[in-house]
Image: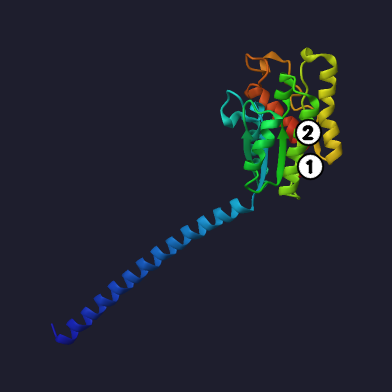
């Protein structure tokens, strides 16, 4: 084979290999860029979502249930199904009173909150804590939220208690939530356990904490007040 032919063939091979390497690098770079863009897109999507924080006791926490069965997760499912840009945070703690909630709220407010759903007071009522003390603590929590995030919308979840503490205490306790909601111009859920309290099949054996089916109804009660704020 003539020397010129060999040289041409060699040049063609080198060019082909170079093209192959260039194409491979370009594809790899493109795939890498696509992955980076996807991650950035997911990051931006998460950052643009507003936060709904549910701050409460064992009712919010979903006592003895899987977290996916508690009403905060059920609200998240509704938000997702409607394509609404919100993420829910379940900050429920079993046994929480308004006093311990007042101490804990600073910690949960370290991250931005757009809607704050306050569900506390039931344990105060069951323990016979002074209604004046409960009022004072709920107001302190609300004022901390307002001071930290002035534009945050607050939803107050109302509670009622059994009459075993006496009619006077029971009646006074029930006035706490509407009075505070009016004073601070808050969205009010009149009674979060409406349609669940006192119905055996919708509560656990203790007769106090809702079952998974009960939480479905709680989610309805909350959604009715929450939806107009979205």
Eyeballing the image, is 108 above or below 14? Answer: above
Q: How is the image coloured?
A: rainbow
Q: Secondary structure at mark 2?
A: helix
Q: Position of residue 98 (x, y in %)?
A: 71, 31
Q: Position of residue 92 (x, y in %)?
A: 63, 32
Front one among 90 and 228: 90
In the rendered image, the residue lying farthest to the left is 1
Depth order, front residue of 65/42 = 65
Kindly identify the residue that appears in the image at 84 percent across and 15 percent down: 167
Q: Which mark is residue 136?
A: 2
**Marks 2 & 1, CB-CB < 8 Å contact:** no
Residue 182 percent location from the top left of the image: 86, 37
Name the residue carrying label 1. Answer: 228
Taking 71 as reference, is 6 left or right? left
Q: Is 23 on the left-hand or right-hand side of 223?
A: left
| Mark sitting earlier along the chain (2/1) | 2
Q: CA distance from mark 2 to mark 1?
A: 28 Å
Determine the secondary structure under disc 1. helix
Q: Which of 22 and 11 lies nearest the eye of the viewer?
A: 22
Above or below 9: residue 84? above
């Amino acid at each position: 084979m003539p020397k010129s032919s060999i040289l041409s063939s060699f040049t063609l091979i080198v060019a082909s290999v170079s093209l192959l390497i260039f194409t491979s690098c370009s594809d790899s770079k493109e795939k890498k860029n696509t992955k980076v863009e996807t991650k950035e897109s997911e990051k931006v999507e998460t950052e643009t979502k507003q936060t709904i924080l549910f701050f409460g006791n064992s009712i919010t926490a979903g006592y003895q249930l899987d977290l996916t069965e508690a009403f905060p997760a059920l609200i998240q499912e509704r938000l997702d199904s409607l394509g609404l840009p919100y993420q829910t945070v379940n900050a429920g703690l079993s046994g929480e009173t308004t006093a311990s909630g007042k101490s804990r709220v600073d910690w949960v407010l370290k991250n931005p909150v757009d809607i704050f759903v306050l569900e506390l007071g039931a344990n105060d009522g069951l323990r016979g804590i002074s209604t004046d003390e409960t009022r004072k603590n709920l107001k302190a929590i609300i004022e901390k939220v307002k001071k930290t995030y002035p534009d945050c919308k607050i939803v107050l979840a109302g509670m009622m208690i059994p009459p075993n503490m006496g009619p006077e205490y029971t009646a006074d306790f029930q006035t706490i939530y509407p009075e505070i909601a009016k004073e601070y111009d808050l969205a009010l859920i009149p009674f979060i356990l409406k349609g669940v309290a006192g119905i055996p099949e919708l509560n656990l054996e203790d007769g106090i904490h809702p079952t998974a089916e009960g939480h479905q109804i709680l989610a309805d009660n909350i959604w009715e007040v929450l939806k107009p704020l979205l």
